[in-house]
Image: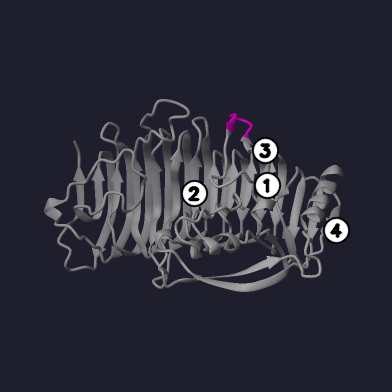
Amino acid sequence: MARKDGETINVRDYGAIGVAEKAETQVCPARVHAGWNPEAELRRDIYRAPRDKPDARDTGGLQAAIDAVSERGGGTVLVPPGDYLTGPLWLCSDIHLHLESGARLWGSPEISDYETEDIFSDKTHGQKYLTGQARNVALINAANENNITISGPGQISGQGGAYFIPWWRADKSYTLQRPWRLFSLNGCKEVTVRDLNVKDSCSWTLVFQDCCHVRVSGVRIDCVHGPNADGIDIENSQFVTISDCDVFTTDDGICLKSTHPDGVVRNITVSNCNVRTLCNGFKIGTETLGIVEDVVFSNCTAYNLSSDPVNMAAAIAVGCCDGAKVERVQFQNIAANQCKAAFYMHLGKRTSKQAPYRDSRIGSLEGITISNLRAAGCIMPSFICGHKDVPIKDVILRDVRISGSFVCESDPAEIDVPELPEGYPDTRMYGDLPCYGLFIRNAENIVQNNLQVKNQNPADSRQMIKAITY
């Protein structure tokens, strides 16, 4: 609940009707180039305005109720059961948006509903940023507001299928246009999101940028229809707790990013979360321009099913590529299954992300601890790879047990691992590695305490660990 007491306003009293109807189910084969098995099918129920009210949208009534609460000094906006078809909404300070059981907000399937004449700007740093597809905003927005709560048990859907299904069906020349992030909270303080069901984002799902004191708990995210649908992204934000969430997505599950040189990601705690993904479970990066420090992931699971199109990329991913300082990060009590690699750490030197701000530099990656990791179903080795001029330092691997049937298509004696300072960090970035368990290069003070790797592929002749220094 909002800290400031206020009255409760029902959106029905402000013109929201909540009678959007279900359209036909659409089926299509997925694209190989998007990482899906071509035999996979996507099914999506598209919601639209009712036939007898073709111009009906609930945006006006929902926004009017939000504005009315704001004008009265704060309070609760209550969304009762119903199907509400809406465009972008803007939240205000001291507001609690509560969706009752059976209340469902459906993002408009029309891209024009999200377009705006104003380019969304980062007021703190003066940097303009766009969606990459169109000038548009997210479905749920807040900028420089304080004391916001969004709660369930209702549901918010971005209707990603309305945008992705035509793209899946078309040839590769088709230009994908889609709304921006599903939730975009920028420059806000004291934010709570809890007990909410979130579905079918068109891009990143729940995003906090330049925020402070954020609490996310009991949120269920299901976004599997297209690419770039990260579950929860923390950008340049501090004092964030994420707990007891279930995330199912095609991209990174829970991801921390520092997206400008003075961006700070600090005091982040992630606990008791389950991530099912085709990409990385718990990740730092890839955008890493400022500071990331004092982070703890604990008591979490990351997995994919053997019946899914591809394995999860990695349970744990730490990429420092853009000159950031990343230090004091802990991963504790993590269970993983069906991943390409259990974990990786990469220190690079990309020029493209740094060019708008400074001459490119190498950052630092120090003080990373992985303890009590259990990863099964792996097919690729983990790696810790620093830069040839700046090593990764002070990594502790304690009680780490990894198993799988590891695959190598090259002659181990002929493998020459390239230096890829500009490379995008990924489990596959180096190709085959000369070991099946852990590859270490350009790293100092790597402490291994009960590291076990069981290779279930008897044809793999590689050694378990390979360390290279120059």
The correct choice, above or below, for 63 with respect to 277 in the image is above
Mark 2 vs mark 4: in front: 4
Q: Residue 51 carries which label?
A: none
Q: Is residue 125 magenta?
A: yes
> Are the residues flagged by discs 1 and 2 in contact, CB closer than 8 Å?
no
Closer to the camera in the image, 270 or 204? 204
Question: Dividing the picture into quarters, in which one does residue 403 lie?
Answer: bottom left
Q: Give the range drawn in magenta.
A: 122-127
Mark 3 vs mark 2, CA separation in Å: 28 Å
Q: Which amino acid does label 3 sit on?
A: Asp
Q: Marks 4/1: CA distance?
A: 20 Å
Q: Which of label 4 and label 1 is nearer to you?
A: 4
**In this figure, which residue is indicated by the disc labeled 2?**
255
Instruction: Please tell me how crowded label 1 is: few (under 14), some (14-19), or many (20+) other residues with Cα within 10 Å.
Output: some
Residue closest to the eye, 138 or 317: 138
Q: Is residue 289 visible?
A: yes
Q: What residue type is labelled 2?
A: Cys
Asked if labels 4 and 2 touch by Cβ distance under 8 angstroms, the answer is no
Left/right placement of residue 218 relative to residue 19 reads left
Magenta stretch secondary structure, dominant = loop
Circle on res. 141: 1
Residue 44 magenta-highlighted: no
The crowd level at tag 3 (other Cα within 10 Å; few <14, some 14-19, many 20+) is: few
Crowdedness near tag 2: few (<14), some (14–19) or many (≥20) residues, C-alpha within 10 Å: many
What residue sits 36% from the left and 46% below the top?
425
Q: Which residue lies furthest to the left in this view?
A: 413
Question: Which numbered disc flags the more N-terminal residue, 3 or 4?
Answer: 4
